Image (cartoon, rainbow, N blue to C red):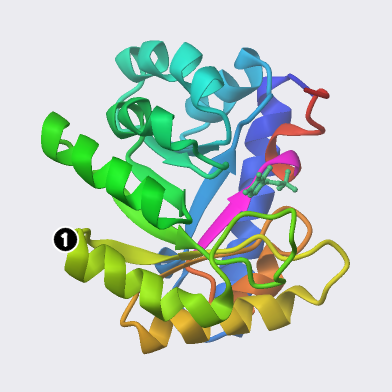
Amino acid sequence: MAQDEDIEANLEAVRRRIGAACAEAGRSADEVTLVAVSKLQPAERIEAALRAGQRCFGENYVQEAAGRWPALRERFDGIELHMIGPLQSNKAGQAVALFDVVQSLDRPRLARALAKEMDKQGRRPRLLIQVNTGEEPQKSGVKPQEADAFVDLCRRELGLDIEGLMAIPPAGDEPALHAALLAKIAARNGLGQVSIGMSDDYPIAIRFGATIVRVGSAIFGARPAR
Ligand SMILES: *Cc1c(COP(=O)(O)O)cnc(C)c1O
């Protein structure tokens, strides 16, 4: 699995399915960004993806990402790093320094911490707000009915430029419903990016409005346990 050719073939297959889903939905394939989710994956698999031309990656843990991406950025041009895991407010500074996109903005305290760090560092990662579309108690994200108010708070009170929304649907639920709901909340708030869809459901998510899909195991193979 760690072979370069396997990862290259997986990436090609995923890109082909993205293209097919876009065609079916009457959308252009360049409307959809593929984020390769590399959390917990061995370094050689990530390097294989980079050698195969992938440049957009997603990580869940600040510590792990900080341990490997600064060195990889020196070796490969054009890397775009997305934070997709729960983010503690006290790691906002590290996150602003490290990531190009934070997709997991999910509460006022974190929004304030990020805004402060952005001013301090003069670096402004793009931001997506995470919505808990399944309203699962164990999952991060604002509730769907609180999303508009939170977008508003980020924009008006904190001057943050919000690009879109992100969600992780409950396992076993119909992903199309969650993609459609997320796309609807994004549209009514004038937000262009809809991040939803993982290895098992990204083609469906695209048909229902995803503009960013986050695919891990279908590219890199199974993750080693944490
Ligand atoms: C791990 C993870 C993914 C990728 O999951 P796969 O099933 O391996 O594609 C996508 N999004 C988030 C938020 C994740 O934590």
The single residue placed furthest to the front in the displayed view is: 109
Q: Residues within 10 Å of mark 1 (few under 14, many from 20)?
A: few
**Residue at position x 50%, y 39% in the image:** 87
Give the camera-side residue of 167 and 6.
Answer: 167
Q: Is residue 16 left or right of residue 188?
A: right
Give the camera-side residue of 217 and 180.
Answer: 180
Q: Is residue 200 magenta?
A: no
Q: Is residue 135 visible?
A: yes
**Residue at position x 57%, y 41% in the image:** 85
Q: Position of residue 12 (x, y in %)?
A: 62, 46
Residue that numbered label 1 is attached to: 159
Q: Quadrant of the N terminus?
A: top right
Q: Position of residue 38 (x, y in %)?
A: 61, 32
Q: Is residue 137 above or below residue 123?
A: below
Q: Is residue 63 above or below residue 223?
A: above
Q: Is residue 180 above or below residue 88?
A: below
| Magenta-tinted stretch | 212-217
Q: Is residue 214 magenta?
A: yes
Helix, strand or loop for the magenta stretch, by majority: strand
Q: Quadrant of the C terminus?
A: top right
Report which quarter residue 157 is drawn in: bottom left
Specify the amino acid type for callout 1. Gly
Secondary structure at badge 1 equals loop
